[in-house]
């Protein structure tokens, strides 16, 4: 039995009462999270665990890194300083295969979102996720936040496939993080919030993207556009049957991204 305001209630009665009580929802239809930071904490823990594994196995030379980072086209390497673009030739000479998306390593469009090597890289991305993630989950709910995160990251991967270096190893959660920035900008515009602070944050990240030659502008731009588009679907769907409209819109975005990836395979081949 459980204590109640008057007397005691049996656990079964409490469970039935919980089922019949309407759960609180966010302004955009999502279930309100009891702990809005939980999802971001799990994502951060996953990124950090994978970073530790990659660091312990050699960093950029880690076999794990070469399997998880996004490489549009595969190649073989004969040594630390020698790389060949022609996979068949170098592999026949005893090289080590570095798989690419066009060769069937389709998982890389997702795993690259959790792959980091440099300390500053993972530190910056996880700090941004810690600040942005809970705010967005509180505003749109956990399921919609996860859809935003992964679709943003996938959009970044799509632009890398189409416009990135063919044999590069693009990695990092930056595409998903830029997607969160794009979504936060859309939400701020929707509610009439202060967009100047968000604009300054975006400008700072734009400077970083342009100033450092090894930063993937393709992943950043693709993630930002993907996140903004997902947010538009979530916050501007009609109130009547909002969930149905949101599901249809997010499904359409996912299908379009998958179609772009499929077309990218043909182009790379």
Image (spheres, helix red, strand yellow):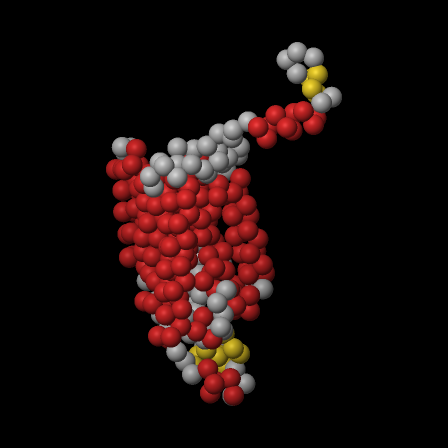
In this orientation, which residue lies closer to the viewer: 212 or 95? 95
Q: In this view, does 166 lie above or below 194?
A: below
Q: In which quarter of the image is the C terminus?
A: bottom left
In this orientation, which residue lies closer to the viewer: 237 or 191? 237
Please state the total of marks drawn on the protein image.
Answer: 0
Q: Residue 55 location, x and y as percent?
A: 55, 60
Q: Residue 172 location, x and y as percent?
A: 44, 57
In this orientation, which residue lies closer to the viewer: 212 or 97? 97
Is 209 on the left-hand or right-hand side of 65? left
Q: In this view, does 54 lie above or below 208?
A: below
Q: Quadrant of the N terminus?
A: top right
Residue at image position (54%, 85%) is: 94
For this orientation, the residue located farthest to the right is 1
Residue at image position (41%, 80%) is: 85
Residue at image position (32%, 45%) is: 232
Residue 178 visible at all: no
Q: In this view, does 200 lie above or below 173?
A: above
Residue at image position (57%, 53%) is: 49
Is 16 on the left-hand or right-hand side of 119? right
Q: Residue 227 location, x and y as percent?
A: 36, 49
Quarter-of-image position of residue 268 = bottom left
Residue 84 visible at all: yes
């Amino acid at each position: 039995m459980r204590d109640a305001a008057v007397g005691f209630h049996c656990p079964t009665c409490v469970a039935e009462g919980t089922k019949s009580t309407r759960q609180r929802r966010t302004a955009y239809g999502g279930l309100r999270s009891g702990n809005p930071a939980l999802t971001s904490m799990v994502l951060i823990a996953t990124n950090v665990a994978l970073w530790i594994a990659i660091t312990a196995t050699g960093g950029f030379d880690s076999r794990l890194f070469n399997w998880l980072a996004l490489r549009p086209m595969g190649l073989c390497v004969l040594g630390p300083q020698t790389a060949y673009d022609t996979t068949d030739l170098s592999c026949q000479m005893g090289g080590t295969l570095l798989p690419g998306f066009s060769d069937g390593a389709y998982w890389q469009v997702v795993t690259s979102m959790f792959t980091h090597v440099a300390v500053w890289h993972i530190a910056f991305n996880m700090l941004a996720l810690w600040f942005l993630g809970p705010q967005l989950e509180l505003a749109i709910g956990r399921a919609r936040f996860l859809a935003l995160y992964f679709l943003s990251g996938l959009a970044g991967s799509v632009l890398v496939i189409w416009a990135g270096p063919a044999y590069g190893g693009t990695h990092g959660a930056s595409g998903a993080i830029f997607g969160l920035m794009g979504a936060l900008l859309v939400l701020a515009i929707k509610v009439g919030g202060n967009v100047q602070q968000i604009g300054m944050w975006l400008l700072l990240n734009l400077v970083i993207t342009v100033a450092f030659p090894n930063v993937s502008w393709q992943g950043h731009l693709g993630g930002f556009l993907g996140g903004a588009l997902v947010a538009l679907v979530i916050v501007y769907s009609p109130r009547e049957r909002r969930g149905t409209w949101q599901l249809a819109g997010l499904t359409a975005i996912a299908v379009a991204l998958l179609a772009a990836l499929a077309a990218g395979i043909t182009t790379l081949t």
